[in-house]
């Protein structure tokens, strides 16, 4: 079990779309935690390059996170109307599977320590192939029911994501009935269940007291993302970094990608409160608008993913944050 020899119970959350970098993964790993490479929105070739970059810098184990492909949007008229509401500069909505098969091939070849999955669970065949390659399979869940499905498919570890978490909700089915459990509630429900797998807690945990609480509630380790956004090794955009120093609330939105995600409230979110469930169609439609906003440093025009406790994030090297997160 990869968790057993870790010097610290700190796992880096994979933060696709910019903040995740090989340098950040290496820094957390070298500090005794478990670093992660985020495969989301990368080509398979870019993913292979990032894995190689981490391997060149550390001999310690690390993980790679992959998005499970979903289904095309059902309400095409709602998608069309939403894209029209975005105005000039919007891209074309389109469905793709984020190079799912190509990335699985990279994982099988790379034989990384951990492959974690978000937005669903891999088939038993996929899990078996990864096990044959010496790779542990972790699945992010938001409910006990999802954890049971992950276990039955061959997961070795479940990552229990509370509703406090920044970025996308990991729910297998994104919709009005998706779980909204807090991380502590989910940890205690898993502890009382028949799942019987090691649990990594994630969501709104950004200081040593939060880590201690999660471990006391039954977690074997804690996955932290937002607390690392201000690290120099992170690829966080300067306007995003500046927003983390403010006091605006966070909220869940589908405005940027068509999938529920938590970020700091900004103008784009408030102007588009009724985005339909359509991932990744809306991700592609808003991508040019978000890129343009980043280019001009406009924090009101792109997603500012952050957990509810983002104000606890401190600007310091990632290794120092790992040490600061350790209880007592």
Image: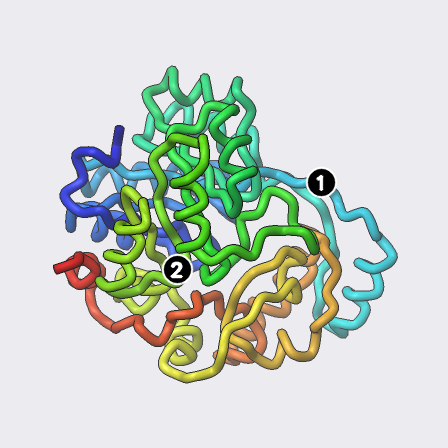
Most distant residue in the front direction? 192
Checking the image for residue 91, the label placed there is none
Q: Residue at x 58, y 72 (%)?
A: 292
Binning the other alpha carbons within 10 Å of mark 1 as few (below 14), some (14 to 19) or many (20 upward) gives: few
Which part of the image, by quadrant, shows the N terminus? Answer: top left
Task: Answer left or right for 119 relative to 84.
Answer: left
Task: Answer left or right for 88 relative to 190.
Answer: right
Q: Residue at label 1?
A: 71
Q: How are the colours assigned in the image?
A: rainbow
Q: Nearer the viewer, residue 25 or 71?
A: 71
Disc on the earlier residue, 1 or 2: 2
Task: Answer left or right for 19 relative to 119.
Answer: left
Q: Secondary structure at mark 2?
A: loop
Q: Residue at x 54, y 54 (%)?
A: 169
- x, y percentage for residue 219? 31, 45
Task: Answer left or right for 25 relative to 119.
Answer: left
- x, y percentage for residue 212? 24, 56
Q: Residue at label 2?
A: 19
Check whether the beta carbons of the residues at disc 1 and disc 2 lie within 8 A of each other.
no
**Above or below — where is 62 with respect to 87?**
above
Q: Nearer the viewer, residue 248 or 110?
A: 248
- x, y percentage for residue 146? 55, 38
Q: Secondary structure at mark 1?
A: loop
């Amino acid at each position: 079990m990869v968790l057993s020899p870790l010097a610290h119970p700190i796992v880096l959350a994979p933060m696709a779309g910019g903040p995740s970098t090989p340098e950040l993964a290496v820094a957390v790993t070298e500090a005794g935690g478990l670093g992660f490479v985020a495969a989301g929105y990368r080509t398979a070739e870019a993913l292979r390059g990032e894995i190689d970059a981490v391997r060149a810098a550390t001999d310690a184990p690390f993980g790679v996170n992959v998005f499970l492909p979903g289904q095309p949007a059902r309400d095409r008229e709602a998608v069309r109307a939403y894209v029209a509401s975005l105005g000039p500069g919007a891209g074309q909505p389109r469905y793709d599977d984020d190079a799912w098969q190509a990335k699985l091939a990279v994982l099988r070849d790379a034989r990384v320590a951990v492959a974690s999955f978000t937005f669903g669970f891999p088939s038993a065949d996929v899990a078996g192939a990864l096990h044959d390659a010496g790779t542990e399979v972790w699945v992010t869940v938001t409910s006990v029911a999802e954890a049971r499905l992950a276990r039955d498919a061959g997961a070795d570890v479940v990552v229990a994501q509370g509703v406090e978490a920044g970025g996308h909700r990991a729910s297998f089915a994104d919709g009005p009935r998706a779980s909204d459990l807090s991380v502590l509630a989910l940890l205690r429900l898993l502890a009382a269940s028949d799942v019987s797998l090691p649990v990594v807690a994630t969501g709104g945990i950004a200081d040593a007291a939060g880590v201690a609480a999660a471990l006391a509630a039954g977690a074997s380790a804690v996955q932290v993302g937002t607390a690392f956004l201000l690290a120099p090794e992170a690829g966080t955009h300067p306007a995003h970094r500046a927003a983390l120093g403010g006091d605006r609330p966070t909220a869940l939105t589908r405005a940027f990608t068509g999938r529920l995600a938590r970020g700091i409230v900004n103008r784009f979110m408030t102007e588009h409160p009724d985005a339909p469930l359509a991932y990744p169609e809306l991700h592609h439609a808003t991508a040019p608008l978000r890129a343009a906003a980043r280019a001009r440093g406009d924090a009101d025009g792109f997603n500012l993913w952050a957990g509810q406790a983002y104000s606890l994030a401190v600007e310091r090297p990632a290794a120092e944050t790992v040490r600061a997160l350790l209880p007592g």
